[in-house]
Amino acid sequence: MGYIQCGTDYAPTVDIARGHLKLNSSKEMSVGSISKMVQDAPYELSTVSALEVYVANQKAGTATYDFNANKALLKAYQSAGISNASTVADVLVLGLMKLPNKDFFELSYLIPTKLLPQVKGDKSDEILANVAKVSVVTKCADMLERAQYTEFWAELASNEASRMAFSSIRGCDDAIRAFILSNIASTFRNIKRSLLYSLLGFSNDEAGGAAFLSKADRVDRATSTADSIAFVKSGTGSSRNDLSLQVGDMLQLVEFLRGSN
């Protein structure tokens, strides 16, 4: 496989068979083997290739999410001056799925420089396309951080690039919805069902919204009605994560909800 300079995309060294990704070697990937590769040869191209396949397996749901391995891959990209924009975008979305944990924000500091939109200089059409792959993810992340939930789902509905960045990763939508629901439940005692569906991206799918809420721990089914959803009060001993709604963002969400009544 020929690696090229950062900002130009390339396909990772994988075989495509029956729709699944696998390493070219016969060795099976495990958390232990990946950790050993990262420890022994973190910047070798063979390690980079293995980590890319590992990300693809996490994306497909055939491997458990591994923050340390994904972080190591972005560090390797920086050290070697190479990158795969599609894989960088996947790593960032996988990190977003762990909100309110800080994974995404730690990973975002490791985005290869040439994939950042604010970097000046002439860029080829290919590099601009690669920058766009990463930019759509950071744009959506900013919306989630600011509690702009309806805007987030509208972005996914109207922008094919944004939609593909998220929908291509198994379980992504439900992970984002769980984060949104947790923030809303921590802020309000109850909310109109139709409005909650909108905030969770179920504006045109009431059945899907009902199915999602039927599995949600924070929903108080005993006091919820056909028109309103009530929330279970969180444990008094639980600590709030640093990336839960900040005061300013919470007020913005409150104003939005008031305007929807």
Image (spheres, helix red, strand yellow):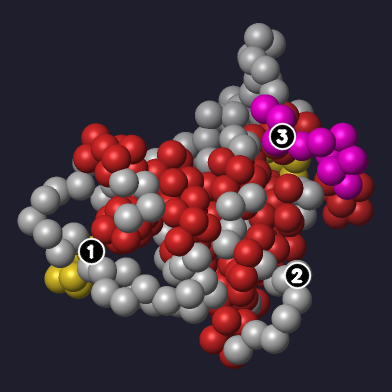
Farthest residue in the left direction?
Answer: 26
76 sits to left or right of 132: left
Which residue lies at the image location 23% right of the left edge and 68% below the top edge?
14
Residue interval drawn in magenta: 241-252
Question: Which residue is more in the foreground, 208 or 172?
Answer: 172
Q: Is residue 204 above or below residue 253?
A: below
Residue 21, numbered circle: 1
**Residue 249 sits inside the magenta stretch:** yes
The Cα–Cα distance between marks 2 and 1, rounded to whole angstroms, is 34 Å
Circle 3 residue: 244
Q: Of the residues shown, which amino acid type is indicated by label 3?
A: Ser
Identify the residue shown where x is 71% and y is 34%: 244
In the rendered image, is residue 93 in sight?
Answer: no
At label 1, the amino acid type is Leu
Residue 122 lies, with reference to residue 218, above or below; the image says: below
Name of the residue lying farthest toward the top = 237
Residue 117, image x, y percentages = 70, 71
Q: Nearer the viewer, mark 1 or mark 3?
A: 1
Secondary structure of the residue carrying tag 1 is: strand
Q: Quadrant of residue 188?
A: top right
Q: Tell me if I can see residue 30 in this picture.
A: yes
Labelled disc at residue 118: 2
Mark found first going from the N terminus, 2 or 1? 1
Q: Is residue 80 magenta?
A: no
Q: Quadrant of residue 66?
A: top left
**What residue is at 31 percent from the left and 46 percent from the top?**
41
